[in-house]
């Protein structure tokens, strides 16, 4: 009730939610009954959960921020939603996002932007700005996001929250409306590292419904976070910083906060080691070929026949109906990426664009392998700037894309990354995050280090 009241009080200004559940209190009451009856419930039982609208739910519409899916009700729950319900979390509602998770500001949502609770004139990050803003504004204690190139970590950075992108395959993508299938991962957003770890424990692990789901058995992430919070994790830890990461493009206050955080980590016994990752800076270029290619293929299913919107064309052919529906249903950024992706995949261009981008992806993976032979984790600023003003970059896609310069390589390599708050930037008093990156499958290390550094 407290969270519903808070949503009523502030969401008119913040607009973190696209839909608020009308039966959250009944679900919560049921958890209370089960607890009273002596049922052993998990640590998160009864905790409200905000769910990014990219994740399908049977009891609330799922639009992925698009008009083409307006009012769509899924016949099944995403695995992460089903597991959250089974653990007794209480879904509060569905959160706003850039359309089909394409963007860094939520300004590409078909339902209007979300506002950053720190300053309502500023962006909350994207694509998962709704989830991060809901947590930052105390509308929800915990949220689910998805991260294809930074959509959990960059919103966490600009809202002073924690966001974790798990190892690729560590969390099921079943029921996460696909953007780029080789990059998408679902993960938690929270106010503390332990909270993210607790949610990750609930949603993670093998899922036979996802063909890329890892069959590993994972350690308890909450236990790792508790070890870190108790002081383990930093003494003797080798933290890599990337030599080739360009200084240009980083706001002075972001760089200063990063350096101050490194000095604090060093004072706690960590060792800062320079590592070389010469291909890191080509991540954005490779990503904007691979992502549109995969997205153009994934979005082909929105054809006016199977899901959502249909625009009738009297006397028209099936193709006319498809074209009219996609024209009306998709926003500008989605169309831009479908066109880019279709072009990059077309005969005669495939090797020059998509093929080259895949080679760069391999080189980035090798850079990470080489770096992780020397260090335990790599640290970067989570994003180059603090929250910018709504409208500031909306007409300049390239500027928008460059927001993800430090997060994208992590998705390309499939490794885990976490953003935790590192303070406020001196010049504008807005939150800044530090990102820690670990080798694949070492998600627990990030929770230990993150909780120790917090
Ligand atoms: N901002 C990036 C993009 O626009 C990342 C999006 C995401 O992680 N879903 O593609």
Image (tube, grey):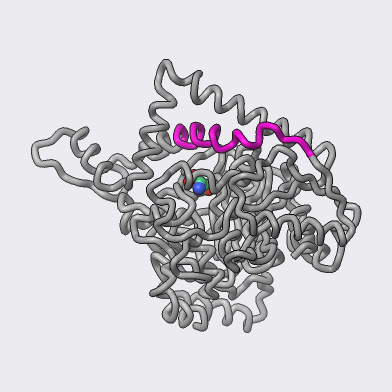
Q: Is residue 51 above or below residue 274?
A: below
Instruction: Where is residue 277? Give x, y as percent.
Output: 72, 35
> Residue placed at 38% from the left, 40% from the top?
299
Direction from residue 403 to residue 44 in the image, left or right: right
Q: Nearer the viewer, residue 44 or 270?
A: 270
User: Residue at (44%, 56%) from the top-left corner?
Assistant: 106
Any part of residue 74 in sight: no
User: Measured from the top left, where is residue 117 in percent x and y?
Assistant: 50, 71
Does the magenta-highlighted stretch encompass residue 208?
Answer: no
- Residue at 57% over, 63% down: 84
| Residue lying at the far left of the rendered structure | 315
The chief SS type of the magenta part is helix
Question: What residue is rendered at 50% in x and 40% in y?
Answer: 180
The foreground one among 142 and 83 is: 142
Tell me the quadrant of the picture where the C terminus can be found.
Answer: bottom right
Q: Residue 292 in the image: state x and y as whole percent.
A: 45, 36
Side (left or right) of 59 relative to 43: left
Q: Is residue 228 above or below residue 149?
A: below
Report whether residue 399 is seen.
yes
Q: Is residue 186 left or right of residue 451?
A: left
User: Who is closer to the viewer here, 109 or 246?
Assistant: 246
- How many discs appear? 0
Give x and y (percent) for residue 420: 67, 60
Nearest the viewer among 246 and 401 is: 246
Q: Which region of the structure is painted magenta?
A: 275-294
Name the residue furthest top.
348
Q: Indicate whether residue 285 is drawn in magenta.
A: yes
């Amino acid at each position: 009730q407290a969270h519903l009241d808070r949503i009523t009080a502030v969401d008119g200004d913040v607009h973190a939610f696209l839909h608020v559940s009308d039966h959250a209190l009944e679900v919560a009451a049921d958890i209370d009954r089960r607890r009273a009856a002596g049922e052993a419930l998990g640590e998160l039982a009864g905790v409200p959960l905000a769910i990014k609208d990219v994740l399908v739910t049977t009891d609330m519409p799922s639009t992925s921020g698009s008009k083409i899916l307006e009012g769509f009700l899924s016949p099944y729950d995403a695995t992460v939603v089903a597991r959250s319900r089974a653990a007794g979390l209480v879904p509060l509602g569905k959160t706003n996002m850039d359309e089909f998770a394409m963007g860094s500001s939520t300004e590409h949502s078909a339902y209007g932007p979300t506002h950053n609770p720190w300053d309502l004139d500023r962006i909350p990050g994207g694509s998962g700005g709704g989830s991060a803003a809901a947590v930052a504004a105390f509308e929800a204690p915990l949220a689910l996001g998805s991260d294809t190139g930074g959509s959990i970590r960059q919103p966490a950075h600009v809202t002073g929250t924690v966001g974790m992108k798990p190892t690729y395959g560590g969390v099921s993508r079943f029921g996460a409306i696909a953007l780029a299938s080789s990059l998408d991962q679902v993960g938690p957003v929270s106010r503390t590292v332990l909270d993210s770890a607790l949610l990750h424990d609930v949603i993670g692990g093998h899922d036979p419904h996802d063909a890329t789901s890892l069959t590993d058995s994972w350690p308890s992430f909450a236990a790792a976070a508790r070890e870190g919070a108790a002081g383990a994790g930093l003494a003797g830890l080798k933290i890599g910083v990337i030599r080739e990461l360009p200084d240009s493009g980083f706001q002075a206050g972001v760089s200063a906060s990063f350096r101050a955080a490194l000095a604090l980590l060093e004072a706690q016994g960590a060792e800062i080691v320079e590592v070389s990752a010469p291909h890191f800076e080509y991540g954005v270029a490779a990503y904007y070929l691979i992502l549109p290619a995969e997205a153009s293929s994934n979005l082909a299913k929105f054809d006016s026949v199977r899901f959502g919107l249909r625009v009738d064309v009297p006397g028209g052919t099936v193709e006319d109906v498809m074209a009219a529906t996609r024209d009306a249903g998709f926003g500008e950024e989605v169309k831009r990426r479908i066109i880019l992706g279709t072009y990059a995949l077309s005969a005669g261009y495939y090797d020059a664009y998509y093929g080259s981008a895949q080679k760069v992806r391999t080189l980035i993976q090798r850079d990470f392998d080489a770096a992780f032979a020397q260090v335990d984790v790599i640290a970067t600023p989570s994003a180059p700037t603090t929250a910018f003003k709504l409208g500031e970059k909306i007409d300049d896609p390239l500027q928008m894309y460059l927001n993800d310069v430090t997060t994208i390589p992590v998705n390309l390599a499939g490794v885990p990354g976490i953003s935790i708050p590192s303070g406020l930037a001196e010049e504008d008093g807005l939150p800044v995050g530090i990102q820690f990156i670990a080798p694949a499958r070492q998600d627990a290390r990030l929770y230990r280090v993150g909780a120790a550094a917090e």
